[in-house]
Amino acid sequence: MKTLKIPEATIIRLSVYSRFLSQADQRGIITISSGEIAEGVGVSPAQVRKDLAYFGEFGTRGVGYNVKDLHHNIMKILGLNSYWPAIIVGAGHLGTALCMYGGFKERGFKVVGMFDNNPDKIGENINNVTIYDLTKMGDIVKKEKVKIGIMAVPAGAAQDVANYLVSAGIKAILNFAPKVINVPEHIAIRNVDLTVNLEILTFNLGLIKDN
Amino acid sequence: MKTLKIPEATIIRLSVYSRFLSQADQRGIITISSGEIAEGVGVSPAQVRKDLAYFGEFGTRGVGYNVKDLHHNIMKILGLNSYWPAIIVGAGHLGTALCMYGGFKERGFKVVGMFDNNPDKIGENINNVTIYDLTKMGDIVKKEKVKIGIMAVPAGAAQDVANYLVSAGIKAILNFAPKVINVPEHIAIRNVDLTVNLEILTFNLGLIKDN
DNA sequence: GACTGTGAAGCCATTCACAGCT
DNA sequence: AGCTGTGAATGGCTTCACAGTC
């Protein structure tokens, strides 16, 4: 795999392609063209081919792509050919909802532990996942070989929690706290910022000259 | 306001700047430089100045920006000087968590209704928000002047729900369903794709030559 | 001296257009 | 004929570097 300098936008699209292909496969479709994929996910055919070309030649000229093959290849590119244990910090409403979220399991993610600093919650079970005290994190990360930590904590606690996750051995963080977090170079981080997303919509609404 | 062709990345950053400025203001900071903002949110100083320059001249050369002023101006740019009623479709775990989420209220968003197709849930209250039958949507959107709809429904229902939102008069959609949705040109849409975000992390984890 | 505002340069992603297979 | 794979062209965002202002 000759990587280095793949646009992040390409990775986002690959993830979307793979979901689309999975659905196409379930509908019994054997072969698919870049144009059909493009149509299904709302990008240009050239974009689909370019994205795939970063990783190899998966199609047949004059024919298209084999759906099962391509899906399998993209899953492998994304690292989804293996099982990914994850932990969630913050057993509030959002953390709980994420723990229950079926979409993660479907794609090979499994929440193996939740963490909270509220003593009343420690020991509780959500969706068969136990809520632990933060001090147990290092052990569980080690024992379950967890690399992914999901943060659903208030903005004020986010940096401290991130530091704690890193010291516990976590390698990638999905952050839901509305706060810019600093992590060491070798830690992957992504922010899912709920209010920012709403604010982009209000900006766009402002551009419309209606009423 | 001479808009047209503002990079979306700029809008995302403006939203982050505004949060940062709000915190700076609370800490009593009066004046701030592009470098300090840049440091706080993890971008370059030139980027901060360029982003702001799309909308006007908010700073003073040799001095910097007045925190309160700049914050107020950015809020206005984002359309956050007014109140934004919103509805949520899908009263499952995620929809419920979003309804309870404090971050929305902090930024001027208010959930004025939830909708679900499960008869058992209709009439229930979550966080003082009533769960209605879908057929009530048009009335509530009109009465409350709602422009924003949040979708927390399964992928399979997403396109239908989106169509329904549009026909009810919604102008902007925040979609949490893992599915590409088609909406008319004049409707603003943003996808918050939880699994895609995790999959970008697994891709990045795959690039690390560790173990 | 410090810091903003901005044209120009540089860089990166997307689109084009066509050669190469089937 | 149909569709992929890809170098070249385009377009857009970011960084640079400096003139302008306090």
Image: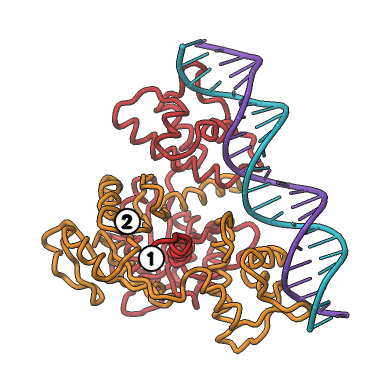
Chain colours: A orange, B red, C cyan, D purple
The dot on residue B114 is: 1
Q: Position of residue A102 (x, y in %)?
A: 38, 75
**Amino acid type at mark 2:** Tyr
Quadrant for the N terminus of chain B in the image: top right
Q: With D5 as the anchor, is A130 left or right in this view?
A: left
Q: Nearer the viewer, residue B184 or A114?
A: A114
Q: Which residue is mark 2?
A: B101
Chain bearing tag 1 is: B
Q: Quadrant of residue A60?
A: bottom right
Asked if A11 appears above or below A27 in the picture, the reply is above
Residue located at (69% from left, 67% from top):
A49
Whether residue A22 is visible, yes or no, is yes
Q: Nearer the viewer, mark 2 or mark 1?
A: 2
Return the residue nearer the eye: A88 or B54: A88
The one nearer the camera, B122 or A65, is: A65
- Identify the disc placed on residue B192: none
Query: Label 2 marks which chain's residue?
Result: B
Q: Earlier in the sequence, mark 2 or mark 1?
A: 2
| Secondary structure under the numbered disc 1 in the rendered image | strand
Residue B153, x across and y down, in percent: 44, 72
At which x and y percent is residue A36? 69, 75
Decide: is B170 above or below A83.
above
